[in-house]
């Protein structure tokens, strides 16, 4: 099969074989219309878009893991603080019982 392309200079319609078009979209190399005007695909190929998406997901995952680790440290800190307050409360309760 072929895909119809419009020349960016002379606006002539011409066909590119699917395999050739896919390759030019991947490598962004120049190709010519039948009138000899060189052109190339500037947009990201599907593969490039997927690689960029994967890189973004890896960054997000790394950020989420870092945030999780920070929250874990904060949780451990506040658990230790709560444990300290619990111990202090028990000591005060014993003192109150002794005084009463």
Image (cartoon, rainbow, N blue to C red):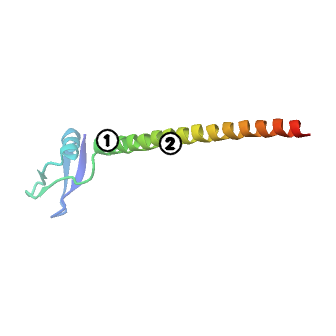
- What residue lies at 21% left-to-right and 52% top-to-bottom? 41
Name the residue tied to disc 2: 70
Q: Position of residue 78 (x, y in %)?
A: 62, 42
Q: CA distance from mark 2 to mark 1?
A: 29 Å
| Residue located at (58% from left, 37% from top) | 76
Q: In screen coordinates, is 57 left or right of 5?
A: right
Please tell me which of labels 2 and 1 falls first in the chain: 1
Quarter of the figure with residue 27: top left
Name the residue tied to disc 1: 51
Q: Nearer the viewer, residue 20 or 34?
A: 20
- Helix, strand, or loop for circle 1? helix
Mark 1 crowd level (few <14, some 14–19, many ≥20, 10 Å Cα) = few
> Which residue sits furthest bottom?
10
User: Looking at the picture, how far across and down is residue 74, in whole percent?
Assistant: 56, 42
Q: Secondary structure at mark 2?
A: helix
Quarter of the image that includes the C terminus: top right
Q: Quadrant of the N terminus?
A: top left
Q: Is residue 35 above or below residue 55?
A: below
**Labels 2 & 1 near each other (Cβ < 8 A):** no
Disc 2: CA contacts within 10 A as few (<14), some (14-19) or many (>=20): few
Q: Is residue 30 or residue 54 the one in the foreground?
A: 54
């Amino acid at each position: 099969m072929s895909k119809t392309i419009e020349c960016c200079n002379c606006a002539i319609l011409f066909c590119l074989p699917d395999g050739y078009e896919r390759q030019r979209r991947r490598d962004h190399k120049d190709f010519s219309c039948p009138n000899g005007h060189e052109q190339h695909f500037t947009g990201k190929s599907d593969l490039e878009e997927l690689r960029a998406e994967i890189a973004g997901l890896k960054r997000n995952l790394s950020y989420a893991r870092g945030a999780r680790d920070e929250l874990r440290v904060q949780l451990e800190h506040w658990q230790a603080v709560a444990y300290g307050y619990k111990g202090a409360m028990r000591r005060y309760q014993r003192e109150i019982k002794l005084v009463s």
